Amino acid sequence: MRFRQINAEDLKREMQIEVYSLLNILQTFLPQMAKAKCGRVVAVATSCTVGIPPKFLGAYTIAKYALLGLIKSAAAEYVEKGIHINALSPNMVETKFLAHVDSRVVEMTAQERLQGRNLSLREVVTGINYLFDEDNPMCGGNLVV
């Protein structure tokens, strides 16, 4: 969808999926984690917030920037309570989602990567595991969103 085609309903749907759902999850679990004075949250965002975002994904990109702001705000507020909130921002990942993305965009994104392909789900999981590793100094808890 081109930028000029974005309407309020499209953006509202993306915000509901990306931002409001995570806000509800965090508001449920963070107070409990704060009482325990420890915890880890790993959210998977997207690389469209790094550099120039992909074309024709305007509502998605806007929502992802809001999601990144939510994660950073929560991280800043809860770090003093012993909770470490991190986010991974992988490039396109080979999932069912890509079936709904223009194949030209998928191919273009893959070509931009050093490996010449999109990430596998296993590669993303490896990153999540790193953030939960007890030896990782950025760590401390237990919620993946």
Image: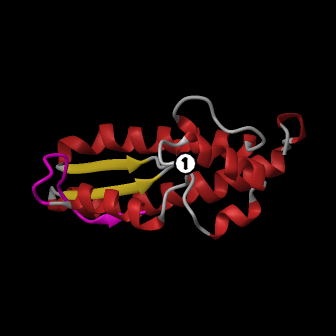
What residue does disc 1 label?
116
- Count of picture labels: 1
Check residue 141 for magenta coloring: yes
Q: Main secondary structure of the magenta part?
A: loop
In the image, 77 versus 63, the foreground residue is: 63
Check residue 135 for magenta coloring: yes
> Which residues, given as a range, are shown in magenta?
134-145
Q: As shown in the figure, which amino acid type bears the numbered disc 1?
A: Gly
In the image, 16 versus 54, the foreground residue is: 54
Work out which quarter of the rendered image holds the C terminus and state it.
bottom left
| In this rendering, position of residue 43 left or right of residue 21 | left
Give me the residue at 74% from left, 50% from top.
12
Above or below, 5 relative to 136? above
Where does the image place residue 125, in percent across and percent down from the top left? 37, 64
| In this rendering, position of residue 136 left or right of residue 4 | left
Give the secondary structure at mark 1. Answer: loop
| In this rendering, position of residue 25 left or right of residue 144 | right
